[in-house]
Image (spheres, rainbow, N blue to C red):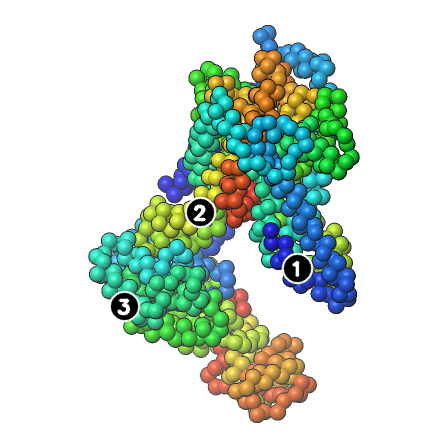
Amino acid sequence: MSASAEPDAVLARNSVPRTVEGAGSARRFLFVSAVIVICAWVLVPIYLLLVNTLSSPQEVTSFPKSFVPSFDFGSIQFFVSFAGVAKALWNSILVAILTMAMSLALGAPAGYALSRFEFAGKEVFRMLVVMTRAFPLPLLALPLAIFFIRTGLDDTAIGLALVHTVLAIPFAALITFSLFSGIPLEFEEAAWTLGCTRWQAFYKVVLPLVLPGIAASAVFAFIISWNEVFAAAVLTIENRTLPAFLVQNLNVSPLHLKFAGGAAMVIPALVFIFAVRKYLFAMWGIASR
Amino acid sequence: MAEIVIKNVAKSFGAFQALHSIDLNISDQEFMVLLGPSGCGKTTLLRIVAGLETPSAGEVWIGGRRVDRLPPRERGIAMVFQNYAVFPHLTVFENIAFGLRMQKLSRQVIDERVRRTAALMHIEQLLKRYSGQLSGGQRQRVAVARALAMEPDVILMDEPLSNLDALLRLEMRAELKGVLDASQTTTLYVTHDQVEAMSLADRIAVMNEGRIVQASTPVEIYRNPAAHFVGSFIGNPPMNFIPATPVAPGEWDVAGLRLSGPQAGDSLEFAIRPEDLDVAPGGLEAVVRVVEPLGPHTLVTTEVGGRLFRAVLESDMPVAPGDELSLVPKEGRVRWFDPGTGQVV
Amino acid sequence: MPRKALPYLLILPATIFLLVFFAYPFVQIGVLAITGPDGLTLQHIQTMAGHWKFKSALGWTVLLAVVVVPIQLVMALSMASIVTRLKAGRNTVLYIFSIPLGLSDLAAGIVWLAIFEQSGFLNSILWNLGLIERPILFLGYQSVWVIFLAVVLAEVWRATAIVMVILVSGMGLIPKEFDEAGQVFGASAWQRFYKITLPLLRPSLQSALILRTLSAFEVFAVVIALGGTTMPVLMGETFQWQFNLQDRNVAAAYALVILTISIASTLFFLRALRVPKGATL
């Protein structure tokens, strides 16, 4: 943690003439402690989950608990070999990838249209996209369950991915909207005057510039699907995703299975958030407007 | 062989009429500047020539070819943008080569042309850099080099110097003039800076509220403004205007001074540039309000007949606020405008 | 003219998709909730309202939102102010603060289960401190308020990050000059926060509150992970009726309730935190 590096920033703020030296350093101490406490508040529970995961099943249920892991992989082995887990993991990945592909394929063109064109009905479309976030989307699973049974989409990865895509589309559209808006139209116009068609200008100039952002929003769609519990639990029976599998078996599964499963959900999310950390603010800042 | 002919071009954005039936001919190799205040439609006109906007009416011809329905890439133009639009993901070399690659030219030709235009713009040493590693002035050079490398019939420039600081602007202005003269390319150049326009242009088209008010050589525009607007927009400080009333046919009363003028109508507007006034007896009676010594000369703001009236005087002339001066218009420099239409009489 | 058609072509796929998979299903929810084999009926809604768990599910859900959302708001505001004051280490702290953003409520429930379960870390700490002699059963069915507390902690832990991120990016939009002007005119740090930052932050506050309140009404997996069915919530009951009791219509009636309170709270925040025209940044 870089808590030790903060003080100059605080000092700069506190160097108002009337601040007495003592009061300034007391405030600085308070500030740094607050940062440390909040970081601990976020990190310690995750650490404790990992301690459980990296302990043997016996250690997990024993008392009192050790606060350092024994690095026994018994819990993990049990989890991985538990019936249905491997399949659930695979289903989760499959659904998440499908969601990622569909939400970008549908959302990115819309984001481009919103950022580059003025057209009648633009506000209506914007409202439609924004409105999706004012609804408890997992509930969509209820009526869609019937629809899917009729169309043979029930209990399939693609069916669930369709629902998750509804969750992810507003983000994909609004994030790509902000990405495209960040590329001056002048770049495209310059490409046109230099001999490009609209499409050439897009893939030679715009696409390379937004690609990292697009990748980040793809990761985002992946996380949305990876984490979704309710619709997954409603729409799948045999082909459960990992969260659906865990929630369905919560009351019957042993503690060490729960914790290993929890870790299996948390760790990819940690990695993904780390991968997209640069874009978090651009995304949520714009996507929440 | 690329003259630009703009015929009856009009453009409206919704209810807003940005351009009213523009006619303008720019001959081959001419340097034409579109000059006007912001919102006058000059950039819209340039973008219509470029193919970035579609005209609501009218025709655009480049080199004897009607182009107004063609996409930009088929018009034989190159453009320098206000913010340069140097692609950030490409090196300077690739930026300059971009249009040439689109034309599928051979590697040798591309290499040779990039190096030649880069040398012309003095950026040979920057070819491997990215846009983010360049200063504003260097980016500007890349943008110009990229346009020149296309060897276009027409170069379009949209306020290319407006984002440079004053000193750099002066330097680039001179350099642009040299390079574009040498390239013998027809140039259409948009600016709101009259000094830039005067120094670069073969001809200036002064625009206001979607119309071309006057299109002529810089000196002509300065000396013989065709309309009140031109006189008040060109020149720093601008022309002085005083309403005149007739006392006899061809004789006008201007704030108490009797002057001979054209025989027309029952009201006119007298106009004179501030530097065309001499301090001598028998002139306009002026009360000095503000004195601004500018070095080579002194700008004096006075009141004549209850109106602001500026005069540029020798800097060794002793004046102070409150002084009374008599200002005599120089021979042949007085202009008369019709107050109704704003046109010169 | 193709140029005019292009934007419509670009939004067409998303529009069709959203109409089929978003607009239509929501109409369906309403239809399911109020129709039976013999046409319109209030029977499903009556079944739902008459069920002994309905009132408590509604009560717990609303109570949870009312407790969790204000705590999150205050915490997120403090975290956001801290982050905006940081210079060195800002990115690291920001990353740590926003980690929970990527976690599901199920994962959060399991994380806090590790702390609250009988052989968990809270008992171990208490025992190590000599405060207890044997581990306490925190999450038993008799201690629903402890379950509630655990759920509140888990929710605050998990979902404060999203509020903070929205607020931080909102604060980023406020020019420094306003704060500096406040200093020049003699406002204290607290006054500047209260009279300058907070009002200018209204649009971000609005979207953060709408987003958070909505997802508070959707609370589901975290409750099951920590309390099983001891503490019923609306979404959990919806799932029960849909999946275990196999009654889609009652499930739809529950969904309708969630939908109604969601829309009501959205409208409330839209009105309460409305920014007058022209008063935006």
Q: Are marks 1 and 3 on the same chain?
A: no
- The answer to whether residue A217 of the structure is visible from this angle is yes
| Residue depicted at 70% across the width and 26% down the height | C139
Q: Position of residue B226 (x, y in %)?
A: 45, 71
From the viewer's perspective, is C81 left or right of B147? right
| Residue depicted at 60% across the width and 88% down the height | B326
Q: Mark 2 against mark 1, which lies toward the viewer?
A: 1
What's the distance in space between the residues labelled 3 and 2, CA to CA?
Answer: 35 Å
Q: Position of residue A28 (x, y in %)?
A: 71, 58
Dividing the picture into quadrants, the one containing residue B19 is bottom left
Q: Are marks 2 and 1 on the same chain?
A: yes
Q: Position of residue B18 (x, y in %)?
A: 47, 55
Q: At label 2, which amino acid type do we have?
A: Pro
Identify the image quadrant of the N terminus of chain C: top left
Q: Are marks 3 and 2 on the same chain?
A: no
Which residue carries the number 1 mark?
A7
Q: Position of residue A236 (x, y in %)?
A: 50, 20
Dot 3 falls on a residue whose secondary structure is helix
Q: Nearer the viewer, residue A213 or B307?
A: A213
Question: How many numbered marks does the figure carry?
Answer: 3
| Residue depicted at 22% across the width and 61% down the height | B109
Q: At label 1, which amino acid type do we have?
A: Pro
The disc label shown at residue C197, or none: none
Q: At label 3, which amino acid type do we have?
A: Arg
- The answer to whether residue C262 of the structure is visible from this angle is no
Which residue carries the number 3 mark?
B116
Query: Given contact means CB atoms under 8 Å apart, are the residues at marks 1 and 3 in contact?
Result: no
Which residue carries the number 2 mark?
A212
Name, please, the residue furthest toward the top. C38
Dot 2 falls on a residue whose secondary structure is helix
Q: Mark 1 against mark 3, which lies toward the viewer?
A: 1
